[in-house]
Every structure is written in C-alpha cells, then in structure tokens.
Image: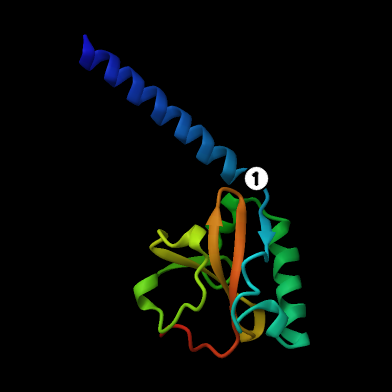
C-alpha cells in the first residue's frame, strides 16, 4: 500500500514539474541586470557600441519564447558552459553559487558575450565578455 501511494505521489509530482517546465518554455524571457554591476565585466563598463548590441540582442530575444530560444543554434541562442571551463568568474552572486553551468549568449558581429544564469523565465546578466578571455572556446 505504501509503495502504491509513493508511486502515485511521484507520478503526480512529475506531471506538475513537466507542466511547470512547459509553462516556462511557453513564456517570453525577462532580463535582469541586477547582478552585473559587481565586477568590471558589467554593462556599465562596456562601450557604447557593445551596449547597443546588448539592447538589440535583448529586443530580438524578447520576441521569442524560451522554447524558441532553446531551439536556435547556439550562435543565435545560448549554450551552457561548465564553470570549470572558465579562466575567471569574478563576483559570482551568492544566489547562483550552486549552479554548475553558466549560460552564454553571443552578441552579433562578434561584439562579445552575455553571461549569467537562467532562473525560471528570467536571464540574469552577470558578465559581458568583450575580450573573449573569460573561457577558452
């Protein structure tokens, strides 16, 4: 009896998780810059052309759902890179210390990369790598 109850509970929980994931995938992304001012790799340190490229990238991504973004090739969408692959990750927010991977979006025309973390439907921009020296690619 206990095993049947446990199995029902796990099945219900799995369905709820799948619904939650489906919900996030069908949402449009939000972007937060709240953590990107703690290091010298933030938006405030980027030049005007890079800042414009960031805005253009966000405008383009904002027209897609998360599922659409996940379906894009990594050059247009994003990829997740192991923390251990990075040469440095200055000022990782405490909120994301347990994350094993960093999300990387490429800016157009090789102007740099937006790096940070996704939580539910929000991408938290933490770093902007315009020197292409934060990890080996």
Of 3 and 98, nearer the camera is 98
Q: In the displayed structure, would residue 32 be above or below residue 109?
A: above
Of 122 and 76, nearer the camera is 122
Of 54 and 90, nearer the camera is 90
Task: Say which residue appears at 73% left-offset and 56% top-offset.
Answer: 63
Q: In the displayed structure, would residue 10 be above or below residue 21?
A: above
Q: Which residue is mark 1?
A: 27
- Quadrant location of the C terminus? bottom left
Q: 10 Å neighbourhood of mark 1: few (<14), some, or many (≥20)? A: some
Q: Residue furthest top?
A: 1
Of 72 and 7, nearer the camera is 7
The image quarter in which residue 23 lies: top right
The image quarter in which residue 122 lies: bottom right
Label count reads 1
Task: Say which residue appears at 44% left-offset and 82% top-offset.
Answer: 88
| Residue 100 position within the rendered picture, expressed as x and y whole percent measured from the top left | 38, 63
Task: Say which residue appears at 62% left-offset and 43% top-offset.
Answer: 26
- Quadrant location of the N terminus? top left
Task: Say which residue appears at 71% left-offset and 74% top-offset.
Answer: 54
For residue 40, side relative to residue 86 (left or right): right
Query: Which of the colour schemes (rainbow, by chain, secondary structure, one colour) is used?
Result: rainbow
| Residue 72 position within the rendered picture, expressed as x and y whole percent measured from the top left | 56, 62
Q: In the displayed structure, would residue 24 be above or below residue 42?
A: above
Q: Secondary structure at mark 1?
A: loop
For residue 81, side relative to residue 116 (left or right): left
| Residue 7 position within the rendered picture, expressed as x and y whole percent measured from the top left | 28, 20
């Amino acid at each position: 009896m206990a095993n049947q109850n446990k199995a029902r509970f796990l099945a219900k929980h799995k369905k709820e998780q799948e619904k939650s994931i489906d919900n996030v995938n069908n949402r449009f992304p939000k972007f937060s810059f709240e953590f990107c001012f703690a290091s010298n790799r933030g938006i405030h340190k980027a030049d005007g052309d890079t800042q414009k490229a960031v805005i253009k990238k966000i405008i383009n991504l904002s027209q897609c759902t998360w599922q659409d973004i996940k379906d894009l090739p990594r050059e247009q969408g994003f990829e997740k890179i192991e923390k251990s692959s990075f040469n440095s990750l200055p000022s990782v927010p405490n909120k994301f210390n347990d994350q094993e991977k960093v999300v990387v979006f490429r800016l157009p025309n090789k102007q740099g990369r937006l790096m940070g973390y996704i939580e539910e439907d929000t991408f938290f921009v933490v770093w902007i790598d315009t020197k292409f020296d934060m990890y080996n690619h």
